[in-house]
Structures are given as C-alpha cells and as structure tokens.
Amino acid sequence: MKVNKIDKIVLLLICISLSVGLITIYQRVNIEKQYNTAEIVLDYEEMLKFSESSGQSLGWWFENFKDYGANSVAIQEETINLLIKKGKSLRADIVSEMIKNYNWENNYSEEVVSEIKNNNIDLYDAIITTKDKNLYEYIVNGLDERYSEQFYKTYSSKDEYYIVLNGNIEDIYYGNSEKVITLEGKGVYENRNIVDSRLFNIGIGYDEEKINQAKNSGLDVVLRPINYPSDNKKLADVFISSNEKFGLVPRLYIVHGKEILGYPENEDKLLNYINEYNIVPVLIESATQREHLEQDGLNKLVEKSNYNSLRAFTMWDYIRGRYKYYNYEGAEEIENTMFRAITERNIRVIYFKPFFIEEGSSKYLTNADEYKDTFDSLTRRLEKHDIKLGQTKSINEFHIGAKRISILSFGIVLAAVFLFIKMFNIKNKHFNLLYLFAVPGAIVPMVMRNIAEKGYALVAAVVFSGIAIYYFMTNIKDVFDSSKSYSNIQLMIKSSIILTISVIISLVGAVFVDSMLSDVRYMLEMDIFRGVKLSQIVPFGVFLVIYLVYFLNKNNENAFKSSINIAKTLLNKDIKIYYAIIAGLIGIVGYVYISRTGHETNLQPSNIEMIFRNFMENVLLARPRTKEFLIAFPAIFAAVFSANKKSDFFTGIFMLTAAIGTSSVINTFSHIRTPIYLSVARTFIGLGFGIIIGCIAILLMNYIYLLHKKIQERLN
C-alpha cells in the first residue's frame, strides 16, 4: 500500500484519534473486570413442582442447589390462580362467562344474583367464592392492603363468602379464536374464547411459609411483586413493608408481568426505594438473545436509577429440554447455554428452572448428580474468565462525552476520505481537499449525539473493513504483477504478514466502533448497534470497486471512466456455464453468511457444527469464528498462491472470499455486550488457526497445481 506525504499526515491524525478510542476501551475493560460475579436465582414455583415429582422435599433441593452455587430464590406474590393450583377451596368466575351456564343463580346468594341482574356487578368483574373463613380473611386483608376501597366488594350468606373484584375489558385474557361457519364453509362469525382474567393474577399477599423455607435453606429471598395498572397507588408501599416484615434486604428487582410496580403514573415510590437501598433493576434477555423483554416503565426506571442495573437470562423451556443434546451424555448443552450467556452476553443473573428429560417434554430431570455435575463444570469454566457464582452486583455507570465522540468522528471521516481516494486510485491532488470534511464531521456529534454515535460507528465498520480489503488486495496485486516466482515458504510468510496487517487494520476499525458505542446503554443492550448486517454487506461493494480499478483496469486510465467501461464490457461478455455455477454458489454462501449473523432467522448452525463449536469452546479461552479461521483467513493464502501462479480467476475468487474476514473481525466487536477481552482473544485465536490452515492450504494447492501440470503434460 503506497502512501504519500498527505497520506502520512492523514494517518498520523487518524492515529491521534485512535488513541482517544484506545483510552476509552481501556476504561471500559476496567469496568468489565469489576463485573465478575454471576448469581443463580431459583424460581420458587418451578422448584416446587420439580420437588413434588422428585420424591425429595423442596427444602432438600434448596440446600443442594445452595451447595451447587445458587444464591437466591425468587418468590412472587400469591394470586387467586396460585391458590387454586395449590388446592385451596376456592371458585373463581368471570361474570360474562359464568352467566352463560344454566341455573347459574343457584351457585350464588340472592344478594349477589340481584347485584348482577341490576348491573351493579358487571360482565368484566370477577367473583371469588369460598367457604373457608380464614382463606377469605387472608384474601380480603391482602386486597385491603394493596388496593382502593372501590376495587372490591364482599358479600356473605350463611357459611359462604363472596369477593367481587371490579374489572374492565382490559383485564380479560383470550385464547385462540374460534371461527363459526355454515355447512357450505362460509364464515358466520369469529368467537374469541375467554380463558382467564388478570384479576385472578393480581397480588394478594406473600406466603410466609415459602419465604421462611428459602431463608432456612440459607438462600436469599427476592420478592417479585405484581403490578395492577388500574389500581396501583399502594403497591410500592406494600412491597417496601413486605421486605421489612419478613426481614429481607432487597438487592434485585425482577419485574413480574408486563410492567414495573406502579406503572403507569405511580412509579416514583418504587424509584425512590430502589435508589435509597441501591436495589438493582434486572433486564431480562429476550428469547432471541437480543435486547430484553419489553416491560413498561423498566427502561425509564433503569435510566433514573443511574443505570444501576444488570442483565438476566431466563431458562426458556426449549433450553431446559436440551438434556442429552448434540450427543452429550448429560446436561452439557444446557450448561453451555448458561456459560455463553454469562461470558459472551454480559448476563449476571441466571433465572434458573430445573431441566426436562428431553426437548418438548414437561417431565423433570430429577437426578441430583446431573445438577451437581452441571454446576461444578460451569464453575470451573467460569474461573478461567475470572467470574464466580455468588451475590452479583450492578454494572458501573459509564458514558462518553460529545467532545470525545467528536475526536473519534474526526478520525473516522479522515479514514473514509482516505479509502475513497485509494479505492478509486485518484491521483489528482485537488481531491485532498476532501479531507477538510473531517472538520464539519467532527461537529455533528455536538448537535446530533445519538445519530452521530451510531452513524459514525457504522461508517467506521465499513471504512476500516474497506481499508483492510484495499491493503490485502493491493499487496496481492503486487505479487500478481511481480515476475518473481515465490517458494512455498516465502508465500506462507508473505501471506501471514498480509493477513496479520489486514486483521490489525480491522481491529483499528473495531476500536473506533467500540469506543463510539462504549456507553452503559449498549453494554446493557438497552440500545444496540443496528448496522451489523449492513456493515458486512457494504465492504463487498468496496471490494468490487477495487477489483475493477486495480485488477481489470489494464490501461491505468481514469478510475471512474475505467470502472464504467469495464462494467460495460463485463455485462456484454458471454457467460460460461461454470461461471454461472460459481456465481450461484457464491450467492448461496453470501445468503448463508448474512442470514447466520444474529439469532433472528431460521437458518441456524447444523448439529455437527455446534458439536465442533462446543468442543472449541471447552478447550479454548474463546471460540474463534468459523468463517474467519476456516474460510476467510486461509483464503488470503490461497489468493496469494493463485496470484503467484498468475491465475486471474482464482485470485479474484479467493480475494472475494477473504473479504468476509475483514468485516467479520469488526463484527465480533460490534456486539457491545460482549467483553472486550473475549473479542480480542477470539480474533487472535482465529488469526493463529487461520495462519496454520492457510499454510496447509498453500501446500495442498501446490500439490494440486503440480498434479494438474503433470496431467496436462501427459495429455499434450
């Protein structure tokens, strides 16, 4: 890569800007080092069902899981539905459904029937009926403590007690719709089946026996209060008093349901309580392993608590069923899932639920040794990353100022202009005036901070990937144009140098991307870098331009004019069948390459690939990216070899494949939730393997080349 005096000045300024990025990365790494404890929180209700199917008591399991590494038990408020599931003597009816039954009046007192018929009890209300006076008083006391007087009414007749909860249409839960059709199959109407009411799932009190059972086992208790949007003024006060009543020191606030306590309009009490006692609001990761579950009011709560938060991974049913998965003998794949969540995705709470014996089953795995082995292995593996199981703490708040972003933006714009000039091989000195755009570019973050940090991060990802592509392509072009015939050893050394410097250039881009987005919002995935796929696609356009200008421009004419003329020639050229086949294969590979980025598509790794990934994950500090060390990095070696043998076609194909690697390296660092050290380790391990495989590729290609040469000689 040839540079002139202006280029040297520009590169120096980029390095100065880069130094600010490196300082930012250093600060972030220090924060990540302190964030080194993961907490296992057991779900009480799941553990209860699990213990009932195991033949062992819940207390026995609590004590065992504490020995395995669990620290806490999450206990939600009691609800009408929970009481019914526990076998309490209760009947719960939604009025609109109840009155459809024949002789429904016989099930209620004359007073209640009269109230319904006079519309004093309406269709969306719920009626709770019991003959157990103690249970009735428990429910009424809980309602009186939590809700206003207008929310419920009580009635009694002889030995039967009624509680009417004042509901509305938003409280109704519907199941699948049922379509009514005629004999000819024509639709008549669609009926939505009512299956439940939110009124049966509101908080009515905590079970002291549950709390004491957890405490007696030596586990912390995390209360999970339930919000009811229509009547929530007193709920935060009850949450506070409940912690005091049971002698609990609250550390984590795990939202139960669709919104935080007090939402809407009455969240301030919860916020004050959280700030006063340094309680950590927990963001629960979504099933796609991207961002977190949408729970109304939670983001604002985290922001107003100065980002005193952390991320949690809840064990979805499909994960719990991965017992003896991928040919493992036990629960290794479930362990792998928890391990990856903690080490790769900044998860610091595992909301634990017991395993199932197989995918799609609801039968629990009750072998205590399996759980012990799983947690023992998880603990050992986490130690390599300086992470331990125990009482977790929130991440430290970290933000970078607009001035720092401006300096970073200045360097990114300079790099973009540098790539533009080099990409089109522009030799006119007047184009150097384009570098002046770096000055207004640095001002943008001062006026449009949010747009600037994401926009410039995307530009950095594309530009430095492009510069790395430009670097390795021009160096391979030098090999192609050289009359020197290199030995295999020389090709290996030269390829290793080209690859290493290309990776370093990509890492510079990664520093810019990571430092632009090194904000606690991104580390908690409350905000994400959405340019990942685009930053992997655009560099191929850069590759195409460089290939046209430097490889197909035989006359060294004006780059713009050359690109147009060459493009016309290619479009008018007769296409051989094997060209079309190769183009089709490249298209398929490209589709797989883009689709496999992230977790939002159905195109996922095969079982064999996952077994291979898991093996590397177990033996290495970080698993390198397969597309880097198996495909893109060795492709540079193959391209250098092909260039040495003066093969236009294979040099171009292998360089195109190598272009995957530059953007992939930056992509590794674009997942801001992943700790920096892990991304660095992943990249350099991949680089090492890539060099080894690349050297083998040169030997293999040389053997094929010599074999092909001999066959050609015999045929001639």
Image (cartoon, helix red, strand yellow):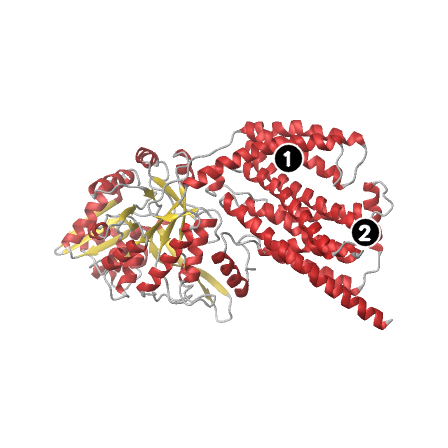
Q: What secondary structure is marked by label 2?
A: loop
Residue type at the position of mark 2: Lys
> Which badge, 2 or 1, is on the more N-terminal residue?
1
Quarter of the picture containing the N terminus is: top right
In this view, the residue in front, 321 or 609, is 609
* Whole-percent x, y for residue 580 in the image: 76, 62
Q: Are there few (<14), some (14-19), or many (20+) residues within 10 Å of tag 2? A: few
In the depicted structure, whether residue 277 falls above or below residue 602: above
Residue 353, label in figure = none
Question: Which residue in the structure is indicated by mark 1?
Answer: 412
Comparing labels 2 and 1, the label whose residue is closer to the camera: 2
* Mark 1 residue element: helix
Q: Which residue is mark 2?
A: 484
Above or below for 705 versus 622: below
Numbered-mark total: 2
* Residue 169 visible to the viewer: yes
Q: Residue at x 84, y 42 (%)?
A: 561
**Which amino acid type corresponds to the residue marked 1 in the rendered image?**
Ile
Left or right of 203 in this view: 338: right
Residue at left 74%, top 65%?
A: 704
